[in-house]
Image (cartoon, helix red, strand yellow):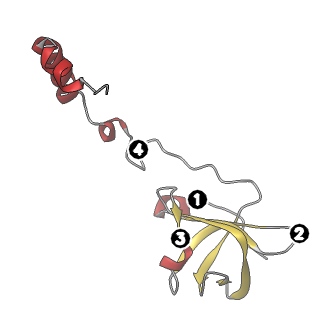
Amino acid sequence: MQRCDFPRRLRAARPGAWSLVLAAALCAPPLWAQQVPFGLGNVRNFPEAALRGKLAVLSTVDAELNGRAIRMAPGMRLFSPQNSLVMLHTVIGQSFKVNYVIEPSTGMLLTAWILTEAEAAQPRPAAK
């Protein structure tokens, strides 16, 4: 029966090569150091059709937008100020100032972006 001889090959390898690989791995900067923190150059571009309003999440399918009841589309996406997806069940009962897009064919809420203070200060059309 043929057995794996990896441990024997590992011991037979030159120790200098392994120490070089280990040193390179330890000296490399971490991946998170390469990322730019939000607010330093990251600008979210909202669609032209996006409107401004206040969103209150009532359940995973129902919400209140500018004081009116609205259904959320099955593919509804809610983005945090850091532009990551927010699961709707985690924000039930909370209200946010948002830019949003309504799906024209159904009238359901399709996408909403929770705004930062700087984004909220920029002018944007509100729903009529």
Q: Which residue is mark 1?
A: 122
Front position in the image: 17 or 103: 17
Residue reaching furthest right? Answer: 105
15 is higher (above) or lower (below) than 94: above
22 is higher (above) or lower (below) than 65: above
Task: Estimate the spatial distance between the alpha carbons at disc 3 and disc 1, rounded to whole Å.
Answer: 26 Å
State the SS at label 2.
loop
Q: Position of residue 112 (x, y in %)?
A: 63, 66
State the SS at label 3.
loop
Q: Amino acid at mark 4?
A: Leu
| Residue 126 image-quadrant placement | bottom right
- Residue 76 visible somewhere in the drawing: yes
Side of 57 relative to 61 (left or right)? left
Q: Position of residue 71 (x, y in %)?
A: 73, 81
Q: Amino acid at mark 2?
A: Ser
Callout 1 touching callout 4 (CB < 8 Å): no
Q: Amino acid at mark 3?
A: Met
Crowding around mark 3 (Cα neighbors within 10 Å: few <14, some 14 to 19, many 20+) is: some
State the SS at label 4.
loop
